[in-house]
Image (spheres, helix red, strand yellow):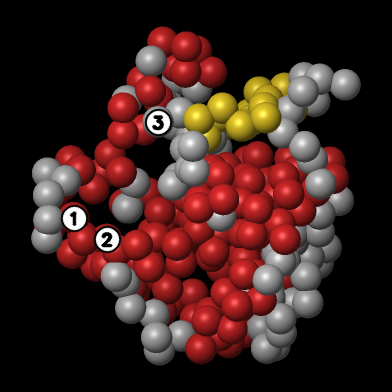
């Protein structure tokens, strides 16, 4: 069996998602740090792995994958993580919930986007982050109303929504985004904080 290797950056939301899923699946992996602050993602050896110059990159089962949502889908289908419901309509609702953060909020809060837009200086960068993260989380909270209150975002086991939510909450806390008016999110965050797969994936647990 080939070794599973994850090229990631400890604070990357996308990498954080994949770490959670690998832990949920019980897949041992070797982490190779790609320091975005030192432009390691633009080095020739990383561009050979991912021409987008992004993390994460996952080498698993003889394949090399990029894009966290695609990686999560692969792990879900090959390791039976049940991150999404079988029912097509319910599946779409959970995907939409996750994508509020992973597709709409995360890209504009990407390090390169934020730096280009703000110059990377304070208070502009923190204002930028809060401007997008706070309403994104409020929307996520509103969409949770469609789902019965449960331990995790959409049920009694972790789903794609939880995997996308927790890294975004890390960013919210880092940048001072207020989600105190989101009780469902707060409750879910407490549940996830007690789960070993989420604990082991936390940036503080993997920081080089």
Quarter location, residue 158: bottom right
Give the left or right position of residue 90, taking residue 58 as reference: right
Nearer mark to the viewer, of 3 and 1: 3
Q: Residue at x 50, y 30 (%)?
A: 33
For disc 1, the marked residue is 125
Distance of label 2 from label 1 (alpha carbons): 6 Å
Q: Position of residue 27 (x, y in %)?
A: 79, 40
Q: Would you say residue 77 is visible in this rendering? A: no
Which label belongs to residue 129? 2
| Depicted 131 relative to depicted 106: above or below | below
Q: Residues within 10 Å of mark 2 (few under 14, many from 20)?
A: many
For disc 3, the marked residue is 35
The residue lying toward the viewer, choosing from 57 and 35, is 35
Give the left or right position of residue 157, taking residue 187 as reference: right
The residue lying toward the viewer, choosing from 3 and 168, is 3
Which label belongs to residue 145? none
């Amino acid at each position: 069996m080939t070794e599973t290797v994850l090229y990631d950056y400890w604070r990357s939301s996308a990498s954080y998602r994949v770490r959670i899923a690998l832990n949920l699946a019980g897949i041992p992996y070797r982490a190779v740090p790609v320091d975005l602050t030192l432009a390691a993602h633009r080095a020739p050896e990383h561009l050979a792995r991912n021409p987008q110059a992004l993390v994460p990159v996952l080498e698993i089962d003889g394949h090399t994958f990029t894009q966290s949502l695609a990686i999560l889908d692969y792990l879900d289908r090959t390791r039976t993580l049940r991150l999404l419901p079988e029912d097509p309509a319910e599946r779409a609702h959970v995907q939409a919930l996750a994508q509020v953060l992973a597709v709409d909020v995360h890209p504009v809060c990407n390090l390169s986007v934020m730096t280009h837009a703000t110059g990377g200086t304070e208070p502009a960068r923190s204002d930028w982050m809060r401007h997008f993260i706070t309403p994104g989380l409020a929307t996520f909270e509103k969409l949770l109303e469609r789902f019965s209150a449960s331990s995790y975002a959409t049920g009694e086991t972790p789903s794609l929504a939880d995997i996308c939510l927790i890294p975004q909450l890390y960013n919210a806390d880092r940048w001072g985004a207020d989600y105190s008016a989101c009780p469902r999110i707060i409750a879910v965050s407490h549940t996830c904080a007690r789960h070993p797969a989420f604990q082991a994936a936390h940036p503080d647990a993997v920081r080089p």
